[in-house]
Image: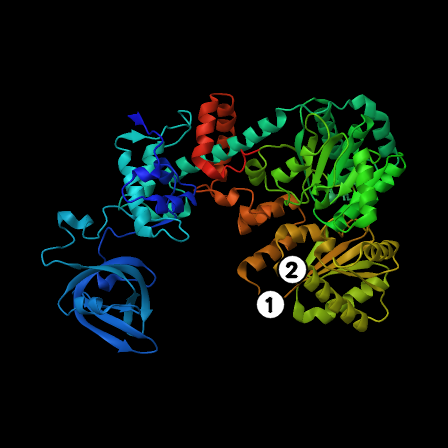
Amino acid sequence: MAVLEPQPVTALRGVGPRLARQLEDYGITQVEDLLFHLPLRYQDRTRVTPIAALQEGGEVSVEGEVRLADIVFGRRRSLVARIQDGTGTLTLRFFHFSAAQKNSLQPGARLRCFGQVRRGASGFEIFHPEYRLLADDEDAGFPGAVEAGLGATLTPVYPTTSGIGQAQWRKLCAQALQRLEQAQPRDLLPAGSGQRFTLVEALRYLHAPPPDAPLQHLLGGTHPAQLRLALEELVAHNLSLLRLREKQQERAAPSLAQGRAAALQRSLLAGLPFSPTAAQLRVMAEIGQDLALPVPMLRLVQGDVGSGKTLVAAHAALQAIANGYQVALMAPTEILAEQHRLNFGGWFEALDIDLEWLSGRVKGRARKAATARIASGEAAMVIGTHALFQEDVAFHRLGLVMVDEQHKFGVHQRLALSEKAGIDGRPHQLVLTATPIPRTLSMVAYADLDCSVIDELPPGRQPVTTLLVDSQRRDQVMARVASACAEGRQAYWVCTLIEESDALQAQAAEATAQQLREALPDLAVGLVHGRMKPAEKATVMAAFKSGAVALLVATTVIEVGVDVPNASLMIIENPERLGLAQLHQLRGRVGRGGGASHCVLLYQAPLSRSGKQRLVAMRESNDGFYIAERDLELRGPGEVLGTRQTGLLAFRIAELPTHNHLLERVQAIAANLQGGDPAIVDELIQRWTGSKARFAEV
Ligand code: ADP
Ligand code: MG
């Protein structure tokens, strides 16, 4: 069989420049691309269903004789036709219709129609069915049935936004399928990939499944034909990430000798009031080896909330600094960046290392001074928010970029930083995650990074007891907070809002703080939110840290980084609004001291099903890795990664967690292909990511 040559879609019947332009929006420029525009679901138009056997909600073909057709003036004017097939009567209802249409639906006419069955006032109805009138000698059994509107296969329903209708997609894809008779796309997966379907068999099956195809499997994404394509798509995706990694490593990185850093690193650890955990030491060693190589490190550090990733980052930073290179640490929020500044500031001051800090709020002369100290290299350690991307920031011998990611920065942002590194090659890159990422998801989304896991918490951490309390019992919860604080404990009261708006969040927190102050006059209540000036925030946080403030009302800005071991109680209002990862991250602020800690999820009834499942998962477990897996099950990959830029939502057929079981094989196949013919890799990436090859475009 000949190999399908590239052929523009305009080679197909009915595709002019206008449609070609529309198809381009779907990434479809070649005939072959159409084959990979896969149906979302299917309709069964292969058989006629007797009216007596109709069920509400079903999409069916029905055949019958028109008994009556009339315009009815109800709440809305409509054309109503009643048809009968010998087993029962069905109502067809049209809210938009033409005079010609009304005239064609004469009593006695026979028609076949297709649509979704709904229950009306007097039996079943179909609104706006697709239909065609049948000639006297036509019936379902006759050989021309396909032309008469009855399919020989299940009817595909294609993903579409606007402009191109289902009928048009079907015609286009049918033409592309016909071309398979003469020439076929190359099967690019190595033989013996353990699949029941070949590429072409799978494509044929999915665009035109036989009438007896198992619809349940097709809808669930578990049919072998779907598995064949999902496997290939995941391999292509994996290869595009591996390629990205290769590209980044084409250029050298500074080799940072471990020996030179040993003294500084020893002093850092010696100055701590605790010893690093075995897991921290292991990850420090893994990073240390990477940094010593003249190849850019690309490493992800995963660890549960409170596992001590910051220390690991500081340890790595010293290796660069000791070798005469600058280090940048970027955080997703200002409060977290400040927290890092405090931690690093304390540690590095003792080591006589200069640190500079930059956020969007640093403006004017202060900003000029900061950027000057960064550009001159006077500041060996730079900590900041997105502001580090701004044009006026230039680095000086930047040897290591660290990103505290919280699933928010993309590959391209990391690269943007390394572009202005001020060195010949590329800096090393270290990504720290705020909460664990499910293993399956990191296999897919972070395949370009090596992974280190801090799988141990510092000793003495107390599991947090989590309670679900209806907000009707808010008064009781307030009383409980008051008595806990009277015993010398400290507490957080976290206000949530659905809106991302800082202003609204701040308002809500202010109102809550006011109310708590009135209700609990003996209590020192502090307030912190994203709209406050950095100095104000710092004052409140310091007062909380010192114990002068007993109850801290906060927006979710405290989600990350805040560290007050004596705080052992957290109230989260409307926790049902937050994702699991965010809840877990918040709860990680307590349980850091010696005593027992509690987290009260003060929810608003009634809870949605998934809201309830999330809260129950929180009550069940303190393990971030377990919670991450539950989160993936409940919300899907796009939401869990917190970004729509990852390409994960753009999968055509692969789905997580449905196809988790393929991932081990995906990795093996991709690794194998990567060592082989680059033309095959190109073709696979092109086929599946096409013009939207976000990963390959570095
Ligand atoms: P995360 O991994 O969530 O970023 P942090 O780095 O903020 O955690 O660490 C949380 C707290 O634990 C900090 O106060 C830190 O100083 C402390 N810490 C880090 N490592 C250890 C350790 N090995 N033993 C005790 N405390 C530690
Ligand atoms: Mg952290």
Q: Residue at x 21, y 66 (%)?
A: 101
Q: Relative to 692, is 575 on the left or the right?
A: right
Q: Is residue 100 above or below residue 611?
A: below
Does residue 460 appear anywhere in the picture? no
Residue on which the image places disc 1? 605
Residue on which the image places disc 2? 575
Q: CA distance from mark 1 to mark 2?
A: 11 Å
Q: Relative to 176, is 372 on the left or the right?
A: right
Q: Is residue 682 above or below residue 467?
A: above
Query: How many residues crowd around disc 1 within 10 Å: few (fewer than 14), some, or many (20 or more)?
Result: few
Query: How many residues crowd around disc 2 within 10 Å: few (fewer than 14), some, or many (20 or more)?
Result: many
Does residue 54 appear anywhere in the picture? yes
Give the residue type that dot 2 points to.
Answer: Pro
Q: Is residue 381 above or below residue 483?
A: above
Write down the quadrant of residue 454 in the picture.
top right
Give the residue type that dot 1 points to.
Answer: Ala
Say the numbered circle drawn on residue 669: none
